[in-house]
Image (spheres, grey):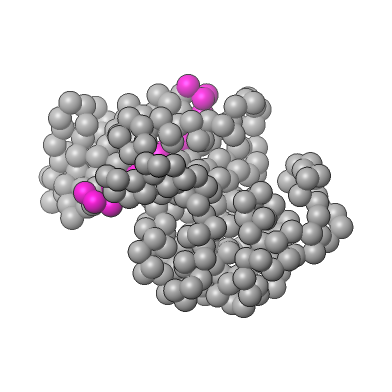
Amino acid sequence: MKYLLLLSLLACAGVLHAQESDGIVVIGGPEPVQLRPEFRSLFTDCAATGSIVLFDERRKTWIASDTTGWRTPVLPASTFKIVNLLIALETGVIGSVQDTVRWPGSTDTAKYGYRPEIYRDMTVQEAFKESAGWVFIELAKKVGRDRYRTLLAQAGYGNGNLSERDTDFWNFGAFGISPYDQVRFLRALYDRSLPFAAQHLATVRDVLVAERTDSYTLSAKTGWTRYGGRNTGWWVGFVEGKSGTFFFATLLLHDRKKARADFGTCRKEITKNVLKRLGYL
């Protein structure tokens, strides 16, 4: 009911037209939006809130679980490694993803958890695959806040708030990106419309590949930060299959006082459940 009330008000204002069929609300426009509130039960099953948004490239159609959360910016956590890698290449901070970053000798385990398997010299590609945050903090120190401000604006990534004093403003503070903007950025990365060198865009796309099968290729990155008493979890990426290319961003929010051991796995389980329901996997 709340979806229909909102859409009726917007339609009366001449902003859009909407219709409902079989419980699916469709907002018209150049890129129509399907509202699928039934997907929210998947978040409830994980004792969490959040949103999932997808874009069907062939049909030029958005699919969203709600009307508000998919446009609300939150910390990107390790999904920021996608644009961070692109910026590190573009600025010349690294020459390639095979560059090695030296282990600085220590990290704040209270903030980032204890992961001894990543406390060693690593190539940038290894660090991306293993989500070794310390490597990208070291790179960020060399990029500098001014270049981030400029290049993030050029990429249309995030809300532009870099007020956080810690180097990794993507894990703590007021910087944020919405699920909608995550997908919009991924679409621009995919079609090479970002204002970065073509070889750097191609490199990031190659590193992003997570799974290949006979029927599809899945490119994706997880993210998880524990800032402000809340678990903020992500899984973002795209699926390339025989029926087309489908972009997704899943955001999971959870009160840390009600910790669940399956929070990390829920991000992927929710996403794959939706992708399969829609016939994308």
Q: Is residue 235 left or right of residue 262?
A: left
Q: Quadrant of residue 194?
A: bottom left
Residue 84: % across, % down: 58, 63
- In front of the other: 121 or 82: 121
Residue 60 in sight here: yes
Residue 110: % across, % down: 79, 43
Of all residues shown, which one is farthest toward the front?
214
Residue 57 drawn above or below residue 258: below
Q: Quadrant of residue 271?
A: top left
- In front of the other: 153 or 39: 39
Of all residues shown, which one is farthest toward the right?
105
Q: Quadrant of residue 250?
A: top left
What residue is shown at x 50% (from left), y 44% (from top)? 211
What residue is shown at x 13% (from left), y 36% (from top)? 19
What residue is shown at x 69% (from left), y 52% (from top)? 132
Residue 266: % across, % down: 53, 30
What residue is shown at x 32% (from left), y 26% (from top)? 38
- How many marks on residues? 0
In the picture, the quarter occupied by the C terminus is top left
Q: Which residues are magenta?
A: 45-59
Residue 195: % across, % down: 42, 74
Q: Is residue 22 left or right of residue 240?
A: left
Residue 55 in sight here: no
100 magenta-colored: no
In the picture, the quarter occupied by the N terminus is top left
Q: Is residue 42 left or right of residue 87?
A: left
- In front of the other: 271 or 225: 271
Of all residues shown, which one is farthest toward the top?
45
